[in-house]
Amino acid sequence: MALGVGARIAVLGLAQAFIGVWVYLAAHGSADAARAPALDATARRGQAVWRENGCASCHALFGLGGHMGPDLTNVTRRRGPDYVAAALTHGLGRMPPRGLAPEDINAVNAYLAHIDSLATYPLPSLTQDSFGQFGAGQPPEPAAGPAAGPPSATAHP
């Protein structure tokens, strides 16, 4: 089935519009990026320290990165900045002390606090209780009506 001239022009116009939107978003960022709060100078320094020290080779943010250590997306909320500072200073488990300057530790904490402010990861589990289908994990009550059983061969709907 060949497209007529009008259909070809329409497809070409849509393709051109799509490419134009894509180029604009690539150059100016998406709407989601515009809504995300910008990193302040300290958090930007923390991001640089994170990258320079290869933290993502062992730790993940939002599930992306290494998995030898814990995901640190919400470590600020769960454990607090003192926990991060102690882990960086003294080491923790398989993680050796990093030998970072106090200002770099503060910067990493600022970066992780920024990451923590963006979202919760992992998302809470969605269960049937979350949707209100069942109460307190109990199965629903059977519907009232005629006794359940196989349909009769003579019954007509």
Image: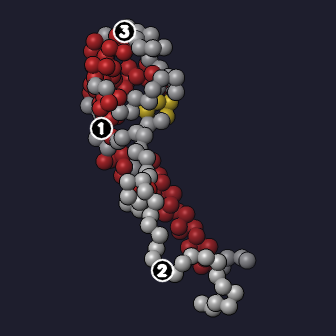
Q: Residue at x 52, y 81 (%)?
A: 146
Q: Which percent across, then down, holds residue 108?
A: 33, 22
Under circle 3, the secondary element is helix
Q: Residue at x 43, y 19 (%)?
A: 52
Under circle 1, the secondary element is helix
The residue tagged 3 is 90
Q: Callout 1, which amino acid? A: Ser
Q: Mark 3 touching mark 2, by CB under 8 A?
A: no
The residue tagged 2 is 145
Q: Mark 3 touching mark 1, by CB under 8 A?
A: no
Q: Callout 3, which amino acid? A: His
The answer to whether residue 15 shows anywhere in this view is: yes
The residue tagged 1 is 117
Whole-number angstrom distance, CA of label 3 to CA of label 1: 26 Å
Q: Which mark is on residue 21?
A: none
Quarter of the rendering occupied by the C terminus: bottom right
Whole-number angstrom distance, CA of label 3 to CA of label 2: 68 Å
Q: Mark 1 touching mark 2, by CB under 8 A?
A: no
Which is more N-terminal, label 1 or label 3? 3
Under circle 2, the secondary element is loop
The one of 101 and 147 positioned closer to us in this rendering: 147
Disc nearest the viewer among 1 and 2: 2
Quarter of the rendering occupied by the N terminus: bottom right
Q: Which percent across, then down, holds residue 47?
A: 37, 26
Disc nearest the viewer among 3 and 2: 2
The one of 37 and 148 positioned closer to us in this rendering: 148
Tell me if residue 152 comes above or below residue 41 in the rendering: below
